[in-house]
C-alpha cells in the first residue's frame, strides 16, 4: 500500500507532467485563461491518462515487448513487437479521446465549444503519450501501479492548469506591464509555479 501511495503522490507533485517535464504545455497555456474551461480539459486529460495507461501496460507486457507472447507457446518466446508500441499507444489514446469528445459534445455543449480544437488535440497531447512512455521506462510491477501512476499524473496536470487559470483570472484585474501581457506573464508564472513544485522533491516518500 505504501508503494501505491508513494507513486500517487510522486506523480502529482514530484514528477508533475507540467512542472517537472513541461509536457502538454500547448493546451496548458492556451486553455488556462478560464477556470471552468481549464477544469473541463483537466478532467478529460485525467480520464484519458487513467484509462489508457493500464491498457497500454497490458499490451506492453503481454503482447509487445520481447518475450511477451510466451504465454501463447514456446515458439513465440523470442517474438519482439516493441517497434509497434508507439503506434499502438497513440491508437489507444486516440480512441479514448474520441469517446471523451463525443460525451462532452453531448452532455456539455458549452464546454465543448469553449475547448474548441484543444479537446481533440488531447490525442496528441505529449503529457498523455509521455505517461505511457514513462510507464515503459519505470517498468511498474503490476497494472495497478500503472493505473495509479496514470491517475496521479492526470491529477497533477489538472492541478497545474487550474492553478494557472485561477492566477490568470486574477491578473485580468492587475496592472501587468504592457510587454509582459499574455504569454509573457504566463511563462513567468509557469516558471515560478515550477520552482514551487520543486520543493516537493525534498519530501521522503
Image (cartoon, helix red, strand yellow):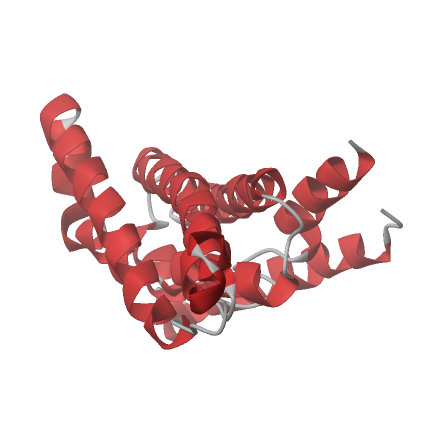
Q: Quadrant of the N terminus?
A: top right
Q: Is residue 199 left or right of residue 9?
A: right
The structure residue drawn at horizontal position 40% and vertical position 39%, both measured from the top left corner, is 51
Q: Is residue 130 left or right of residue 139?
A: left
Outermost residue toward the right?
Answer: 204
The structure residue drawn at horizontal position 70% and vertical position 45%, both measured from the top left corner, is 7
Return the residue nearer the eye: 46 or 4. 4
Residue 23 screen position, x and y as percent: 46, 65
Return the residue nearer the eye: 204 or 69. 69
Residue 52 screen position, x and y as percent: 39, 46
Q: Is residue 21 left or right of residue 38?
A: right
Q: Is residue 194 left or right of residue 25?
A: right
One can see residue 31 in this view: yes
Return the residue nearer the eye: 40 or 166. 40
Give above or below for 126 relative to 35: below
Residue 20 screen position, x and y as percent: 62, 64
Give above or below for 25 relative to 197: below
The structure residue drawn at horizontal position 23% and vertical position 37%, both measured from the top left corner, is 100
One can see residue 176 in this view: no
Residue 192 screen position, x and y as percent: 63, 62
Outermost residue toward the top?
Answer: 107
Amino acid at each position: 500500500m505504501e508503494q501505491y501511495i508513494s507513486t500517487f503522490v510522486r506523480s502529482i507533485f514530484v514528477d508533475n507532467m507540467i512542472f517537472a517535464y513541461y509536457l502538454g504545455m500547448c493546451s496548458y497555456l492556451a486553455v488556462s485563461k478560464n477556470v471552468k474551461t481549464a477544469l473541463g480539459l483537466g478532467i478529460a486529460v485525467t480520464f484519458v491518462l487513467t484509462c489508457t495507461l493500464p491498457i497500454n501496460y497490458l499490451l506492453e507486457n503481454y503482447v509487445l515487448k520481447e518475450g511477451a507472447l510466451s504465454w501463447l507457446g514456446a515458439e513465440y518466446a523470442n517474438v519482439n513487437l516493441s517497434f509497434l508500441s508507439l503506434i499502438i499507444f497513440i491508437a489507444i489514446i486516440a480512441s479514448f479521446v474520441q469517446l471523451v469528445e463525443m460525451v462532452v459534445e453531448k452532455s456539455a455543449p458549452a464546454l465543448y465549444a469553449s475547448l474548441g480544437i484543444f479537446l481533440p488535440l488531447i490525442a496528441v497531447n505529449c503529457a498523455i503519450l509521455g505517461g505511457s512512455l514513462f510507464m515503459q521506462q519505470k517498468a511498474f510491477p503490476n497494472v495497478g501501479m500503472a493505473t495509479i501512476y496514470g491517475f496521479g499524473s492526470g491529477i497533477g496536470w489538472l492541478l497545474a492548469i487550474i492553478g494557472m487559470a485561477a492566477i490568470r483570472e486574477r491578473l485580468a484585474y492587475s496592472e501587468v506591464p504592457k510587454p509582459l501581457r499574455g504569454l509573457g506573464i504566463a511563462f513567468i508564472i509557469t516558471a515560478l509555479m515550477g520552482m514551487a513544485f520543486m520543493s516537493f522533491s525534498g519530501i521522503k516518500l
